[in-house]
Amino acid sequence: ERMSVNTKDRIEKGELVRLSGISLSDLHNWVARGLLPAYCGRYIQGGRGSVYYYPAQALKLAKDIKYWRNQGYTMPEVRKILSEGIEPKWPI
């Protein structure tokens, strides 16, 4: 069984997707749009490919983006909300 690596300053891609409840395509899309930070490191797992790490704050951001999208906001609106530091009203 593969051990999860999650330190206080970074989170492994699989954990980020699992804990935030977003899809891998959402992750890549939101990084490409500049809403989430790009990966900050990777290591090669012998014969099994690379494991990518993202800054730890990406988890909260991903949850926030998902929240605002679920409330019906467009991506440009979400970008504005994030830039203004408006917090989601949890729980939904």
Image (spheres, rainbow, N blue to C red):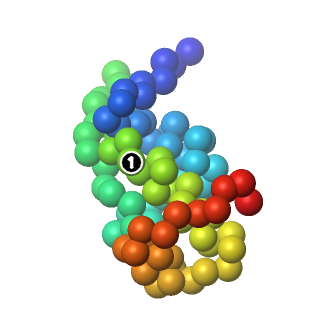
Image-quadrant location for residue 36: bottom left
- Residue 52: x and y in percent read 35, 40
Q: Check the image and report above or below for 77 versus 28.
A: below
Of residues 2 and 74, which is closer to you in this image?
Answer: 74
- Residue lying farthest top? 1
The percent position of residue 63, horizontal first and vertical second, equals 56, 55
Identify the residue at horizontal 68%, vertical 69% (top origin). Answer: 70
Q: Quadrant of the C terminus?
A: bottom right
Q: Which residue is mark 1?
A: 57
| Rendered image quadrant of residue 72 | bottom right
Question: Closest to the observer: 59 or 3?
Answer: 59
90 horizontally vs 34: left or right: right
The residue shown at (52%, 37%) is 15
List x then y, in percent, for residue 30: 44, 66
Q: Estimate the x, y position of residue 33 in percent, counting from the top left.
A: 38, 73
In the image, is 42 to the left or to the right of 5?
Answer: left
Residue beneath the point at 52% across and 63% down: 87
Which amino acid lies under the numbered mark 1 shown in the image of this protein? Gln
Up/down of 80 relative to 70, above or below: below
In the rendered image, the residue lying farthest to the right is: 92
- In-image side of 31 versus 43 (left or right): right
Element type where label 1 sits in the image: helix
